[in-house]
Image (cartoon, rainbow, N blue to C red):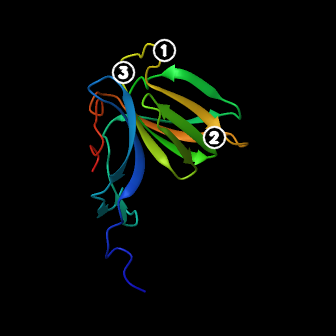
Amino acid sequence: MSDPFSLAPQPETYWHLWTGTDGISRQQQCTINQFQLGQLGPGDSPQFSRPLFDQGNAFVTYLPVGWTADWHENHVPKWIYVLRGAWSVQSMDGQIAIMRAGEYSFGGDQGCIATPEGHKGHLSAQVGDEPCVQLIIQRNDAAWRQAPPGFFQ
């Protein structure tokens, strides 16, 4: 067997929700790469990681079966990791992304301009017959605000 640390991991794919200069939210698949081999703490086994921020918040959310949200913007940019179940996000351009356990997205749709129908930001909903459990990670500053697709490469 070859050395597991001899090759860096392949880029990870995620959905990036963002606001264009026209004020319309959109979604695009992007990748995170440039993982570095190192230790997260003294005595830890080496692992590949990609730091995203120094200070922030992380919390778990639970979306029960049937949960939906009206049109809204993410109040701050955040990463949303699906731990269990599934959920959907519809952006103002009509794109619908469904994320299941093991998939994740970036919510950076701040600053949208409402359409005549009152659509601003995105719609989100729990999908399927199992609750959706998510891990949310957000910064305490504006460093991710208006991050375009590809920002985290």
Q: Residue at x 59, y 39 (%)?
A: 87
Please name which of the two marks, 3 or 2, marks the residue nearer to the observer: 3
> Which amino acid, by three-letter code, is at mark 1?
Glu
Please name which of the two marks, 1 or 2, marks the residue nearer to the observer: 1
Label 1 SS: loop
State left or right for residue 109 relative to residue 146.
Answer: right
Residue pointed to by mark 1: 117
Q: Residue at x 28, y 35 (%)?
A: 147
Label 3 SS: loop
Q: How many marks?
A: 3
> Which amino acid, by three-letter code, is at mark 2?
Cys
- Which numbered dot is residue 97? none
Residue 21 percent coordinates (x, y): 26, 26
Can residue 142 be seen in the rendering of this structure?
yes
- The vertical placement of 117 against 83, above or below, is above
Residue 7 percent coordinates (x, y): 32, 73
Residue pointed to by mark 3: 112
- The vertical placement of 15 against 109, above or below, is below
Can residue 77 be seen in the rendering of this structure?
no
Q: Crowding at label 3, few (<14), some or many (≥20) Cα neighbours within 10 Å?
A: many
Check contact, mark 3 vs mark 2: CB within 8 A. no
